Every structure is written in structure tokens, then in C-alpha cells.
Amino acid sequence: MDGPRAATLTDLDVVATALGEAFTDDPLMIWAFPDDESRPRVLRGMFGFLAEHLYLPDGEVVVDDRGAAALWQPPGARGEDSESFWAQHGAGFVEVLEGQIERTMVLGAAMAEHHPDEVHWYLPAIGVRPVAHGQGVGGALLAHTLASVDRDGAAAYLEATTPRSVVLYERHGFEVTTEFTVDDSPPIWPMVRPAR
């Protein structure tokens, strides 16, 4: 049956492929990984690595077999800023990024500064493969976990990286809180969905 569902380890290829393809032409990912040849491979490796080692064990990964995936960090989960995570997995992460770590580190630090203080679910990545665009897959994927967020009475937070994604997130109740850049990066729009 098509539709969003919780991912398992057997879905790592779906997650890595969906997010890798979805972000290959993303302005911020082009800035972070400027080499056009290696970017698709690096993104696929990065998202697969994070799903396997961080979000499946201590978060929530949702997939749609039509070609979409989302990584969520529920309140209280160990996040990408966890010292214990990097102590255990830092070398492997540098390896899948093929050493392209400098801009990723600066970007991660800047993003962490904009997280809201209130308890919230964090959506670091959601993506739909280009072949599945225009079918409502992204909206269904968002709605799937936002139902849990609402049951928890919690807020949700993400960073939008394109004007088109801002519009999608606004339709699901997110509001832009500011705009920032990192060095010479494209703009990033932090967005909060207040608790309901």
C-alpha cells in the first residue's frame, strides 16, 4: 500500500535515494558540496549514514514507497549536536562526506543557534524524488508525523532552503521566524509550527 509508514533498516536504500535525489539541486546543498560530480553520491551517503546511525535508533524515519523520506528528531532524542554521537560516528561521517566537512560543520553550528527554546519536534530533512513530484507525496509525509506532533501537543521546527519549500511548509502551519545565511551561503528560513 502506498503512503507514509515508519521505516526500518531494510528501507535505508529508499531513504538514502529519496533524500539524496531530492537535495542534489538544493541551493544550500550545492553551496555545502559544490562539486557537481560528487554531490549526488555524497548526499546519498550522508542521508543514509544519518538515518542508519542516528534517526532510526533514536528518532523517527518515515518513508513513502513512491519515493520520499523524512528524518525527524522527537523531543528528548539524541540529536546531531550530541557529543556522544560524534565521538562514536564522527570518522564514519567524514568518510561518507569524502572529507567535505568544513562547510557542513559551520552550517550545523549556525542552524543549531536558531532552534527554538521550547520543546519541539525537529525535521532536519524531508525529500521527494523528482519522479514523484506533484503527487502530494511530500504533503502526506509531513502530515503523517505532524499528527503525532499534535497528539503530543508539541511545536515543530525546520529550516526551509527554497521559497517553494517555504510555501509547502506554510500550508502545514509552519511560520517563518527569520532569515539567515552562513558566510556566502544561500538564504535559510527557520520555520516554527506552534503547538496545537
Image (cartoon, rainbow, N blue to C red):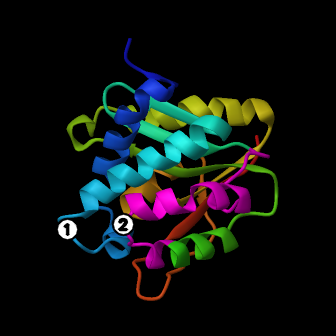
Disc number at residue 29?
2
Is residue 80 something that shows in the picture?
no
Q: Quadrant of residue 18?
A: top left
Query: Which of the pair 77/189 is nearer the observer?
Result: 77
Residue 57 in picture, x, y percent from top left: 63, 36
- Whether residue 70 appears in magenta in the rendering, the answer is no
Q: Alpha-carbon neighbours of circle 2 within 10 Å: few (<14), some, or many (≥20)?
A: some
- Amino acid type of the residue tagged 1 in the rendering: Asp
Question: Where's the N terminus, which quadrant?
Answer: top left
Q: Where's residue 81, x and y in %?
A: 67, 62
**Residue 13 seen anywhere in this rendered image of the structure:** yes
Disc 1 to disc 2, C-alpha distance: 10 Å
- Membership of 87 in magenta stretch: yes
Residue 42 point in image, percent of width and height: 32, 58
Residue drawn at point x = 76 percent, y = 29 percent: 151
Residue with the most extreme bottom position? 183
Give the mark nearer the N terminus: 1 vs 2: 2
Q: What segment carries the magenta color?
A: 75-104
- Mark 1 burial class by Cα count in 10 Å: few <14, some 14-19, many 20+: few
Q: Which mark is residue 67?
A: none
174 sits to left or right of 33 = right
The relative height of residue 187 versus residue 12 in the rendered view (above or below) is below
- In percent of width and height, residue 196 lies at 76, 40
Kindly give the residue lying farthest to the top in the view shown: 1
* Badge 2 element: helix
Q: Which residue is mark 1?
A: 36
- Indicate whether 36 appears above or below 123: below
Residue at the spot x=58%, y=65% of the render? 190
Decide which of 25, 16 is in the foreground and name it: 16
Q: Is residue 113 above or below residue 155?
A: below
